[in-house]
């Protein structure tokens, strides 16, 4: 049995009530959007209220940030390497291979680090949030929190969301550096580019805005993926199968949200 | 048929509680149940999940210091009733009044405060598996009280001793048996010394010996903590052990209510069938997991 405060109330079909029947897909979309906005609103509303659970925040920062670091950096390294490999051969046709560093650095900093790192964290930490909260929902642990006068959003969701928002820019900053290093390795070691010239061109055309936009994107993507992951877990129904569904949805919806938000943020920030 | 008798069969208002228990309730040994303050009043409670009617104008009173046990088959609405009392579910109509407060009308902040007076033990324990036994039991103390860490440690030890799990505070939840998990859940429920204790199916899935032990633990908790208790179960052994009154729920309504000894003697065929666990009888004529539902099918659990 689940509490009214979460899945039960929200899972009623509008078509079964007094409202106009809606196509199932539209209904599902509106339901997800409504839950997302509701959860985000509750996260912001609960954030300034005591008690502040710093231990939980740090624990989540370690879980989201530290444990994701190796896979994020590995992805950034290979992305930078592949980018250098691809652009070097193409730019060589125009005798513009000296701009490989610029292209790799700007691509990583403005776009790729943030998007790829967020997608990886969504698959890793976002899915874990969905599974963890989903399991807590179906085993009545969330009900138990409510019974002990503890708001589950405050206790479970707020630290996860802010831990992700704080850790994503740090992860992306690291990924930026490692991605640029990957491009350097390929260009200088494999392709024989001049190392000094490569580094010069890497940063010559970079503005602070390029760097900041990537970090802002990372924070926004973190907010999206953590809120969606928690939301999917929080509204889990249907036992173990439901937890599986929530975990999958957490990754799929967060990935879509990240890619969609990337477009709008890019339009907004540049 | 079950529906031929819509008025619940009531036993005596007098509870056969021990003198000690009686005395602690009002200070007047032998005080009749009617004379005591009502802590929980459910009036005309109706609850549906989609097309499935689970509670059908349910009425129930629980007096101060009383141990009320609600029995009934699977899917008859026992857990739903319990979750209405603590405000985890809102009724479609009817009211839940606890200590004069209409639970349905409380906003989020008020209901959070309201729940401080409750302790609830869940069906499978609902223990936080990221914490050990000690931290689980200490959780409500850390969240709901201003006790120092020394006081918390002392209270946790007391609670673990009360549920016969002394010295197991460092154990991980994954290392516990089903019965031990339930008892840790009890310890967590009583830790902050609530005024009202709720037990949701405390013996489901346990062997008969463990079931009997759990019954003893709940009985001891009632005697030592002196709180109002509502237990839901389908286990009559536990019901007779811990109840001052037993109410039987069927198709979303209370169909019988009496102190344990009187409950055993009630003439209602449904009560007799349930007590004796007979396969044939008026309860068997109903659809399985039917609750009060006449329009829908399927369970409403998780």
Image (cartoon, rainbow, N blue to C red):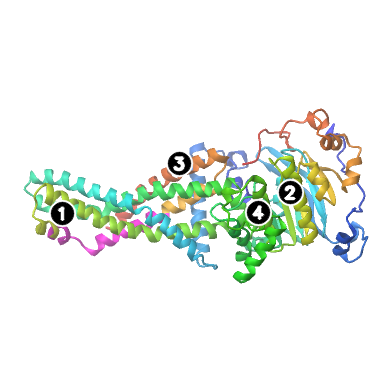
Quadrant that contains the C terminus of chain B? top right
Task: Kindly identify which chain the residue marked by label 4 belongs to.
Answer: B
**Residue at point 57%, 42% (across, down):** A237
Q: Identify the disc placed on residue A248.
A: 3
- Circle 3 sits in a helix, a strand or a loop, which is it? helix
How many other residues sit within 10 Å of disc 1, few (<14), some (14-19) or many (≥20)? many
Task: Inspect the magenta stretch and tell me whether residue A205 lies in it.
Answer: yes
Which image quadrant is residue A165 in? bottom left
Magenta range is A200-223
Is B218 on the left-hand or right-hand side of A85? right
Is A145 on the left-hand or right-hand side of A217? right
Quadrant that contains the N terminus of chain B? top right
C-beta proximity under 8 Å, tags 4 and 3: no
In the depicted view, which residue is nearer to us: B191 or B115? Answer: B191
Q: Position of residue A134 (x, y in %)?
A: 53, 46
- For label 4, the residue is B184
Distance between the Cα atoms at labels 4 and 3? 33 Å
- For label 1, the residue is A101
Residue B85 visible to the viewer: yes
- Circle 4 sits in a helix, a strand or a loop, which is it? helix
Task: Inspect the magenta stretch and tell me whether residue A248 lies in it.
Answer: no
**Residue at point 33%, 57% (across, down):** A171
Mark closer to the observer (1, 4): 4
Is B9 on the left-hand or right-hand side of A216? right
Distance between the Cα atoms at labels 4 and 2? 11 Å
Residue at the outermost front position: B167
Distance between the Cα atoms at labels 1 and 4? 61 Å
Rendered position, B123 above or below A203: above
- For label 2, the residue is B214
**Residue at point 64%, 49% (across, down):** B181
């Amino acid at each position: 049995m689940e509490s009214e405060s979460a899945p039960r109330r929200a899972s009623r079909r509008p078509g079964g009530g007094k409202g106009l029947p809606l196509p199932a897909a539209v209904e599902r979309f509106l339901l997800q959007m409504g839950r997302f906005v509701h959860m985000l609103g509750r996260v912001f509303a609960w954030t300034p209220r005591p008690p502040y659970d710093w231990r939980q925040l740090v624990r989540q920062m370690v879980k989201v940030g530290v444990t994701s670091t190796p896979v994020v950096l590995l992805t950034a390294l290979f992305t930078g390497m592949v980018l250098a490999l691809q652009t070097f051969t193409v730019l060589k046709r125009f005798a513009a291979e000296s701009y490989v560093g610029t292209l790799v650095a700007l691509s990583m900093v403005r776009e790729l680090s943030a998007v790829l790192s967020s997608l990886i964290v969504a698959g890793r930490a976002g899915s874990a949030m969905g599974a963890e909260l989903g399991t807590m929902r179906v085993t009545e642990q969330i009900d138990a929190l409510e019974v002990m006068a503890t708001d589950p959003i405050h206790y479970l969701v707020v630290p996860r969301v802010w831990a992700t928002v704080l850790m994503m820019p740090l992860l992306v900053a690291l990924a930026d550096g490692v991605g640029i290093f990957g491009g350097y390795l390929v260009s200088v070691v494999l392709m024989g580019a001049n190392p000094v010239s490569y580094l010069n061109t890497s940063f010559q055309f970079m503005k602070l805005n390029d760097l900041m936009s990537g970090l802002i994107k990372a924070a926004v993507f973190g907010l999206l993926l953590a809120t969606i992951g928690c939301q999917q877990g929080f509204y889990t129904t249907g036992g173990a199968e439901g937890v599986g569904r929530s975990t999958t949805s957490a990754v799929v919806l967060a990935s879509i949200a990240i890619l969609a938000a990337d477009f709008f943020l890019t339009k907004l920030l540049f | 048929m079950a529906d031929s008798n819509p008025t619940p069969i009531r036993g005596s208002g007098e509870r056969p509680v021990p003198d000690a228990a009686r005395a602690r309730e009002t200070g007047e040994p032998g005080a009749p149940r009617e004379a005591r303050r009502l802590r929980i009043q459910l009036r005309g409670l109706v609850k549906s999940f989609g097309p499935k009617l689970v509670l059908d104008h349910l009425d129930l009173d629980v007096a101060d210091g009383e141990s009320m046990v609600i029995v009934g088959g699977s899917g008859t609405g026992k857990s739903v009733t319990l979750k209405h009392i603590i405000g985890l579910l809102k009724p479609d109509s009817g009211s839940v009044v606890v200590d004069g407060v209409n639970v349905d009308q409380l906003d989020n902040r008020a209901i959070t405060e309201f729940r401080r007076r409750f302790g609830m033990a869940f069906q499978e324990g609902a223990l936080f598996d990221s914490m050990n036994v000690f931290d689980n039991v200490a959780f409500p103390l850390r969240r709901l009280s201003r006790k120092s860490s020394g006081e918390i440690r002392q209270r946790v030890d007391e609670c673990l001793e009360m549920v016969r799990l002394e010295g197991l505070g460092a154990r991980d939840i994954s290392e516990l048996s089903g019965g031990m998990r339930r008892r840790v859940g009890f310890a967590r429920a009583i830790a902050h010394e609530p005024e009202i204790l709720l037990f949701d199916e405390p013996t489901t899935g346990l062997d008969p010996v463990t079931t009997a032990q759990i019954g003893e633990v709940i009985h001891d908790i009632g005697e030592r903590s002196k709180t109002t208790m509502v237990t839901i179960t389908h286990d009559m052994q536990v019901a007779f052990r811990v109840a001052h009154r037993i109410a039987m729920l069927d198709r979303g309504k209370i169909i019988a209510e009496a102190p344990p000894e009187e409950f055993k003697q009630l003439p209602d065929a449904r009560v007799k069938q349930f007590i004796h666990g007979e396969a044939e009888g008026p309860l068997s004529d109903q659809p399985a997991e039917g609750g009060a539902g006449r329009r829908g099918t399927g369970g409403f659990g998780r």
